[in-house]
Amino acid sequence: MKKVMLGIALVVLLVATLSGCASTTSFESQQFPVYKPIPPTIPPTTNEDFSVKINATVKETDLNTPVKKETQSNELKNVENTVVKSETQSPKITEEEIILPKEKKEPEKIRTFVQVNKGCAFNIDKKTCLYARSGVGTTTKALFPLRVNMLLEIDPEYTTKDSGGIAWHKVIQGFGDTYPAYVGNPWFVPANQIEIVFMPPEPPADATKKIVIDLSEQRLRAYKNNKLIREVVVSTGRGGWATPTGKFHISKKLPSRYMKSSPGASDWYDLPGVSYTMYFTIRGAAIHCEYWHDQLGTRRSHGCVNTDCVDARWLYGWTPLGTPVFVQN
């Protein structure tokens, strides 16, 4: 029985072999297994991560607006825009970021002047002269005789009354005063013998104006467009203090000036409150009011051009800085 079964198996094997080799089926008609590439392994992405990536470029509220193409990834941008600062590195500030503090301009202080209008005039008389005093009231020490037409600057914030109810002002050292007679002792003056004076405004520049001073005639003439506007009697320098001749310009103007000679001078003088002073030479020659003599029309000064105080005030308000001054014999 075993031999019969073995024979049958050999016959079946032979038939299968002969049928496979003699098959007429073509290569194209044969069916082979389809090749399927294996996808790369990608870590699973959660819905949350996906929404974050989408929102990095497009917000939910921007879905209807065009999306600009990104040229760099957010990670690269973050790396490029990161600045590592050392302890000594100062932050970079652009011009737009610099905010300069606003310059605080202090309000311009109003200068206040008073003119003496009572007391002695040219000659000093102890009985009639008004005196600057060391304090408030006539019982305080008399420091300096004040004559009519002196112009003194006062502290506008200081006014006090004496026991009789009279107001007193405190005199201060004015701009340009280099010889204050009240060193160590402030001056106080009573309001009932002085009057507050306001300075005329500075006139605008005017190339048509000029001043001509004639030494031989002792006259000052103010011209505009070569037309005589005002003629003034003056006193110019005498002897070794002659007023210089030539062409000059008004270089500085001071409402009030303290004028005093050098110690030991042969012709000594001490004149506070010289008003409406206009300098025209570098050596100090000036046009100004005089209150200490009554000899206008003669050579009387130490080189300056003395005028009546009314004329001096008019000239001060009419003459701008830079006005040419011609001094001739």
Image (cartoon, rainbow, N blue to C red):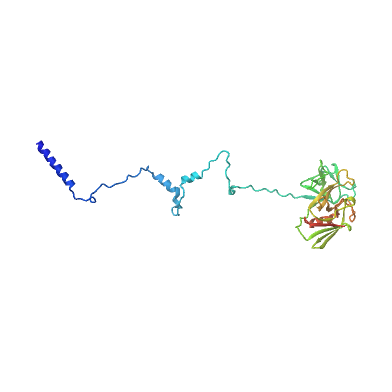
- Residue that protrudes farthest toward the top in the picture: 2
Q: Is residue 6 above or below residue 117?
A: above
Name which residue lies at 40% across and 46% down.
50
Residue 176 as seen in the image, left or right of residue 21: right
- Residue 115 % position (x, y): 82, 51
Residue 79 as seen in the image, left or right of residue 243: left
Quadrant occupied by the N terminus = top left
144 or 28: which is nearer to us?
28
Name which residue lies at 13% across and 40% down.
10
Which image quadrant for residue 236? bottom right
- Residue 313 % position (x, y): 82, 55
Total numbered labels: 0
Quadrant occupied by the C terminus = bottom right
Residue 116 as seen in the image, left or right of residue 57: right
- Residue 161 % position (x, y): 80, 45
Residue 61 as seen in the image, left or right of residue 146: left
284 or 116: which is nearer to us?
284
265 or 60: which is nearer to us?
265
- Residue 151 % position (x, y): 82, 50
Which image quadrant for residue 186? top right
